[in-house]
C-alpha cells in the first residue's frame, strides 16, 4: 500500500513537471556577464505586462522610477504614458495614434547606467544575434564614437569605441544597457484616435 502511494505521488510529480513549461529567458541574447534578466532581479518583470506595483514589489517602494541596482549599476524604469502619441501618414492623411488604455502604466523600458567605468572584457563575445552599428554619442558635454548592439527582442548595449583625452570615457566602456519594447509590441499598444 505504501509503495502504491509513493508510485502515485511520483507519477503525479512527473506528469506535472512534463506539463508545466520551464520559465524562458525573455532576452536570450544578453551579453555574458551582463545578463540582468537571466541571472538578476528582473526575471519577475515583463515589459508591457508588469506595472509600477510589480517594480516596487521587486525593488522596493522608493524604486518606482529608478534606484541603485547594486554597487556598480543604477537602474531606471519607464512606463507607457497616456500622453504618448504617434503620427503616421496614410493615403496622404495624417493619422494620430494613442496607447490603448490597458497598456497605460505598463513597463515600457529598463535602463542600466554604470556608476563607474565598467569595461567589456576583450574575452567576451557579442552574440551574433545582436546587430551592431557604429555611431556617435552626444551627452554630458562629451562627443565620442559608440558601438550600439541590439536584437529583435530589444536588448541594447552601448559601448564606447574610443578613449577621450580626459579619460572620462574609455574604449570598451559600457555606456548603457537598455531593455525596450520591441517594434512589433510597440505597434500593438497603439490605437487610432477617432476624429
Image (spheres, rainbow, N blue to C red):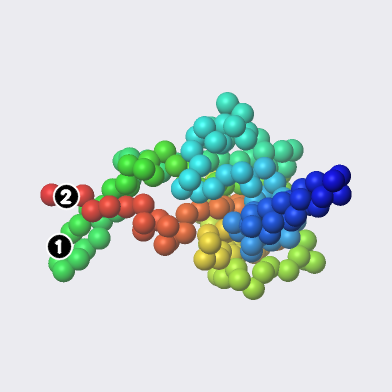
Q: Quadrant of the rendered structure where residue 151 is? A: bottom right
- Which numbered circle lies on residue 117? none
SS at mark 1 in the image: strand
Rendered location of residue 69, percent (x, y): 67, 38
Specify whether residue 118 is in view: no
- Which numbered circle lies on residue 194? 2
- Which residue is outermost to the top? 61
Distance Cα–Cα, label 2 vs label 1: 13 Å
Count of all numbered marks drawn on residues in the image: 2
Specify whether residue 89 is in view: yes
SS at mark 2 in the image: loop
In primary-sequence order, the first of circles 2 and 1 is 1
Q: Residues within 10 Å of mark 2 (few under 14, many from 20)?
A: few
> Which residue is tagged 1?
93
Q: Residue at x 52, y 32 (%)?
A: 53
Decide if residue 119 is on the left or right side of residue 4.
left
- Which residue is outermost to the front? 1
Amino acid at each position: 500500500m505504501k509503495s502504491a502511494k509513493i508510485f502515485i505521488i511520483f507519477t503525479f510529480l512527473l506528469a506535472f513537471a512534463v506539463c508545466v513549461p520551464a520559465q524562458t529567458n525573455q532576452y536570450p541574447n544578453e551579453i555574458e556577464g551582463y545578463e540582468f534578466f537571466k541571472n538578476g532581479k528582473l526575471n519577475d518583470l515583463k515589459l508591457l505586462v508588469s506595472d509600477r506595483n510589480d517594480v516596487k514589489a521587486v525593488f522596493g517602494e522608493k524604486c518606482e522610477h529608478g534606484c541603485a541596482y547594486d554597487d556598480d549599476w543604477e537602474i531606471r524604469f519607464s512606463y507607457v504614458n497616456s500622453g504618448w502619441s504617434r503620427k503616421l501618414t496614410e493615403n496622404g492623411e495624417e493619422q494620430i495614434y494613442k496607447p490603448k488604455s490597458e497598456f497605460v502604466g505598463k513597463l515600457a523600458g529598463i535602463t542600466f547606467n554604470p556608476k563607474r567605468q565598467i569595461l567589456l572584457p576583450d574575452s567576451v563575445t557579442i552574440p551574433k544575434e545582436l546587430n551592431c552599428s557604429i555611431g556617435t554619442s552626444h551627452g554630458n558635454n562629451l562627443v565620442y564614437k559608440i558601438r550600439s548592439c541590439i536584437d529583435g527582442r530589444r536588448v541594447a548595449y552601448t559601448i564606447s569605441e574610443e578613449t577621450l583625452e580626459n579619460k572620462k570615457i574609455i574604449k570598451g566602456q559600457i555606456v548603457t544597457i537598455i531593455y525596450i519594447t520591441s517594434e512589433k509590441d510597440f505597434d500593438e499598444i497603439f490605437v487610432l484616435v477617432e476624429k
